Image (cartoon, rainbow, N blue to C red):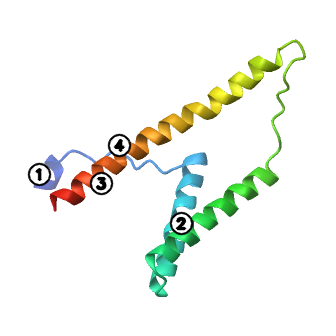
Amino acid sequence: MTSAADDRLPLPPVQLPKGRELQRRRHGDAGVALVSLLRSRGVSVAGTATAATAATAVLLALVLVFLPGSPDTIPGDVPATVVWNFRLASLGQPAVLWAALGLVGGWLVDRLAGSR
């Protein structure tokens, strides 16, 4: 005699986060905790956003200060113009990406706000 529970498929095993994924989740949890704490104490949305931005900037500054520098060196036979052009391109690519994301996101939010 079998029950209805025996006919169901077993659930897949739970995959717990490891390594970098666990670190990312902890950082995200810390951000959520900061925002929740500030909002529960009556801090305005603008104040909460400012505090979250400042906390992120401090965290990034600490990472830049305490992590070791790059062990890679630029060989002496590489022309300086090639290095400079590479650096500009390396900065330009994320600038274009974030500009496009901002423009499309802004357009979508504006469109959503207009439909209400």
Left/right placement of residue 82 relative to residue 9 reads: right
**Is 97 in front, or is 4?**
97
**Front label number (1 vs 4):** 4
Instruction: Give the Cα separation between the discs numbered 1 and 4.
Output: 55 Å
Q: Is residue 32 above or below residue 68?
A: below
Question: Tags 1 and 4 in contact by the CB under 8 Å rule?
Answer: no
For mark 2, give the secondary structure: helix
**Front label number (2 vs 3):** 3
Farthest residue in the right direction? 76
Instruction: Give the Cα separation between the discs numbered 3 and 4.
Output: 9 Å
Q: Is residue 95 above or below residue 88?
A: below
What residue does disc 1 label? 2
Residue at (64% x, 30% y) in the render? 90
Residue at (60% x, 54% y) in the render? 23
Q: Amino acid at mark 4?
A: Val
- Residue 104 location, quadrant: top left
Tell me the tag on residue 104: 4
What residue does disc 2 label? 31
Left/right placement of residue 114 relative to residue 45 reads: left
Left/right placement of residue 36 relative to residue 76 reads: left
Q: Earlier in the sequence, mark 1 or mark 4?
A: 1
Q: Is residue 3 visible?
A: no
What residue does disc 3 label? 109
**Front label number (2 vs 4):** 4
Q: Earlier in the sequence, mark 2 or mark 4?
A: 2
